[in-house]
Image (spheres, grey):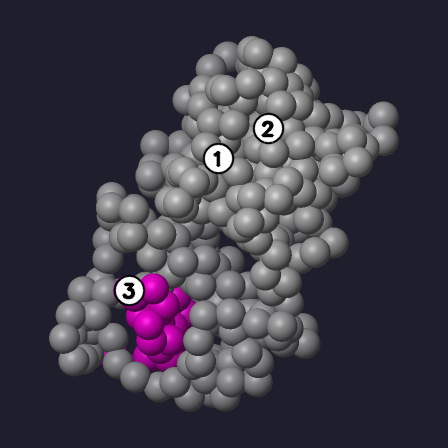
Amino acid sequence: MGFNDAMSGYKKLKNEEGYTNQSLLELLKQTEYSFGTPEMGTVAKKESIVFHNVGSFTVYVTVKDKSIEIGRVVEQGTGKFVLKNLGAAMFSDAQSKDTAVADRAVEELYDVIMGVKKGQPIENKAASNDGIKLYMRQKILSIGDKYSICDLDENPQYWVVGNIIGLKFKIQDNHDNEIMEINKKMVAITPEYTLIKNGEKYGHIKKKIKLTRPVIAGEIDKKPVEITGDITGYHFAIKLAEETIGTVDTERLTWGDVYSIEVRNAAYKDLVVTIAVIADNTLKNK
């Protein structure tokens, strides 16, 4: 279909349907988004569909005769933009998080346009965001063999229990019921993880070697899963069967540096927590 590198901030599709900026805008207006409202504007002196104030970025869609481009730009003064090169790094905490927010908006917009191209009903992305947030300290298994995942008031919601070398650990709820078992295996220089649920294999994922950003991919419950991160390695998006079910971001709270875990689909809350633990483990051992 075209260039599609998650968390890159840019995507390009074929315009096989003959859309114009105006006709695509009318379709995109039929739903709500988690990051803003579309309107007509210009980017790099070209007519484009734009979403303003997505972090420190403007997210755009530019329709051409043969292609549809989706990306993010940084606004500098009224009507002036700077196009970001693919893979460009922004290294401060605030800039890195803003970049991740904009990249996820590009990904969400790509999903909507792909659905439109396939003739699928347009899903309300704003309504589909459950907004459940949990927090865990970074490098959680570096301190001890048991650690909590909390709400904002530091009330434990999950427990992570593992051995000192981190080859096997479990996720438990507040009543010590096992949610998931994670078995880690080192293959060459990349780790692989097998997920066990209710005593049976539930999934298998593996970290891939990428020069620009970490990628963890595999299969969960017979569905493809991909966990992609920004170039800093501290902002992740979790996608299951083409649906973003959660995100993981670095934040600084009064009680320490933490990962903020946002659950986009409550049905996958346990899985999002499990993958957040795996993402932390891969960073701890990178």
Residue 30, relative to residue 33: is it above or below?
below
**Which is more toward the observer, 220 or 36?**
36
* Position of 45 relative to 251 (above/below): below
| Between discs 1 and 2, the one toward the N terminus | 1
Q: CA distance from mark 1 to mark 3?
A: 26 Å
Q: Is residue 61 visible?
A: yes
Q: Is residue 24 above or below residue 100?
A: below
Name the spot of residue 203 as percent of width and height, x first.
Answer: 72, 32
Residue at the spot 18% in from the left edge and 65% down from the top edge: 82
Query: 10 Å neighbourhood of mark 2: few (<14), some, or many (≥20)?
Result: some
Q: 240 or 271: which is nearer to us?
A: 271
- Residue segment shown in magenta: 46-70
From this view, report whether residue 209 is shown above or below residue 219.
Answer: above
Q: Quadrant of residue 12?
A: bottom left
Which mark identifies residue 137?
A: 1
Q: Decide whether residue 118 is among the magenta residues.
A: no
**Residue topped by disc 2:** 147
Element at label 2? strand
For the point 61% across and 34% down, the residue is 148
* Residue situated in front as seen by the camera: 8 or 46: 8
Question: What amino acid does circle 2 point to?
Answer: Tyr
Direction from residue 256 to residue 72 in the image, left or right: left
| Image location of residue 85, percent across then percent down | 24, 53
According to the picture, the residue beneath numbered tag 3 turns out to be 56
- Give the x, y percent position of residue 124: 62, 74
